[in-house]
Amino acid sequence: MGKAKFARTKPHCNIGTIGHIDHGKTTLTAA
């Protein structure tokens, strides 16, 4: 569920939140 949420938010907030998403994605993968 979290993975799909990130994938969906990535293209939407990828314009100016690429750094934030990148950090969150790494944390999600580590967890």
Image (cartoon, rainbow, N blue to C red):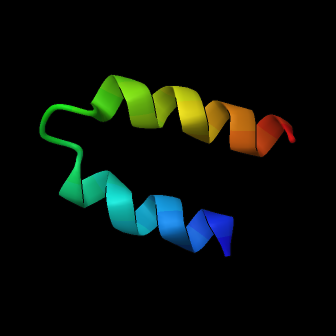
Asked if 29 appears above or below 12 in the picture, the reply is above
Indicate left or right for 2 with 10 as reference.
right
Query: Within the image, what quadrant is residue 23 found in?
Result: top right
Q: Quadrant of the C terminus?
A: top right
Note whether 8 is above or below 17 in the view shown.
Answer: below
Q: Name the side, left or right, on which 6 lies relative to 8.
A: right
Q: Is residue 24 above or below residue 28?
A: above
Residue at image location 34% in from the left, 53% down from the top: 10
Spot the residue most to the right: 31
- Where's residue 9, x and y in %? 35, 60
Say which residue appears at 67% left-offset and 76% top-offset. Answer: 1
> What is the quadrant of residue 3 in the picture?
bottom right
- Residue 29, percent across and down? 75, 43
**Residue drawn at point x = 12 percent, y = 40 percent:** 15
User: x, y (%) of residue 24?
Assistant: 57, 35
In this rendering, position of residue 6 left or right of residue 25: left
